[in-house]
């Protein structure tokens, strides 16, 4: 592997740097966008149950908000429970926008790498072609070593650029789809919370 990197020349280093960033983002997003971490299955039921039991308490607000992104959306609604249904929905929507923005974190960078890596590979190819053309002297004699080096730069950089770009693009699309799906689930859960609290399924006299 070291020999390949050496043969590819200096243009390979920006591509390697992009690959390291891409792998780090993919690993971090896989961990952060776990469904059970973003939209816990039983959070709605637990929240409503605790509302029925003890009403809105500081402990409920803190624990719910710290539990997950969905919990933070719930907290925005719970803090406006005494207001109208529309006010509660508006607060939830604002919190949802903030949470959605955080879930999109790093995805722009991953998409940029997917677009940029082939261009960096193309840059390496052009530099390799310049090296190839420079292998011929004015007298028509070709330096085999310089010619081989130019071919190596051109081919290795093009290949590495594609190798980095393809998985980056695949995971970018995957995470975009995951975020969209999680946002829809959060919206549905939030609507259920609003309906349950304003349809007297939670006893308002206890809150």
Image (cartoon, rainbow, N blue to C red):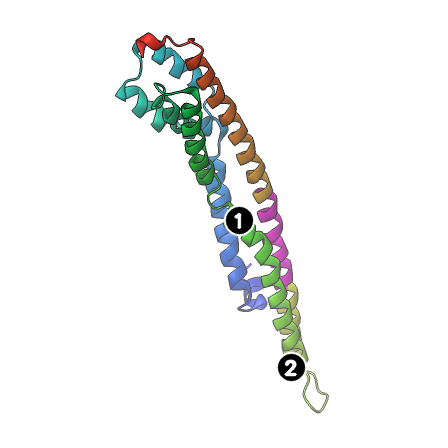
Q: Give the mark nearer the N terminus: 2 vs 1.
A: 1
Range of magenta residues:
156-171
Measuring 49% from the left and 26% from the top, which residue is drawn there?
186
Say which of marks 2 and 1 sits in front. 1
Q: Assign the magenta stretch its main secondary structure.
A: helix
Measuring 36% from the left and 21% from the top, which residue is drawn there?
83
In this rendering, position of residue 72 left or right of residue 103: left
**Are the residues flagged by discs 2 and 1 in contact, CB closer than 8 Å?**
no
Q: Quadrant of the C terminus?
A: top left
Mark-to-mark CA distance, 2 and 1: 36 Å
Q: Would you say residue 165 sits in the magenta stretch?
A: yes
Outermost residue toward the right in this view: 140
Q: Is residue 45 above or below residue 140?
A: above
Q: Is residue 94 above or below residue 45?
A: below
Mark 1 sits on what residue?
110
Provide the secondary structure element on which disc 1 rests.
helix
Measuring 58% from the left and 62% from the top, which residue is drawn there?
120
**Tag of residue 206:** none
**Tag of residue 134:** 2
């Amino acid at each position: 592997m070291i020999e390949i990197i050496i043969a590819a020349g200096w243009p390979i280093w920006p591509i390697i740097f992009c690959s390291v960033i891409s792998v780090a983002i993919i690993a971090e997003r896989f961990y952060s966008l776990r469904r059970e971490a973003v939209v816990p299955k039983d959070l709605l039921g637990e929240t409503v149950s605790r509302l029925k039991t003890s009403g809105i308490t500081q402990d409920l607000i803190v624990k719910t908000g710290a539990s997950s992104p969905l919990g933070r959306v719930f907290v925005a609604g719970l803090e406006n429970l005494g207001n109208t249904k529309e006010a509660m929905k508006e607060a939830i929507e604002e919190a949802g926008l903030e949470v959605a923005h955080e879930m999109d974190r790093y995805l722009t960078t991953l998409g940029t790498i997917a677009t940029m890596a082939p261009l960096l590979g193309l840059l390496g190819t052009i530099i390799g072609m310049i090296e190839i053309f420079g292998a011929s002297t004015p007298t028509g004699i070709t330096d085999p070593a310089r010619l081989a080096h130019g071919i190596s730069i051109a081919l290795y950089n093009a290949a590495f650029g594609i190798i980095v770009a393809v998985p980056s693009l695949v995971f970018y699309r995957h995470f975009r789809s995951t975020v969209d799906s999680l946002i829809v689930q959060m919206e549905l859960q939030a609507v259920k919370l609003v309906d349950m609290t304003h349809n007297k399924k939670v006893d308002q006299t206890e809150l």
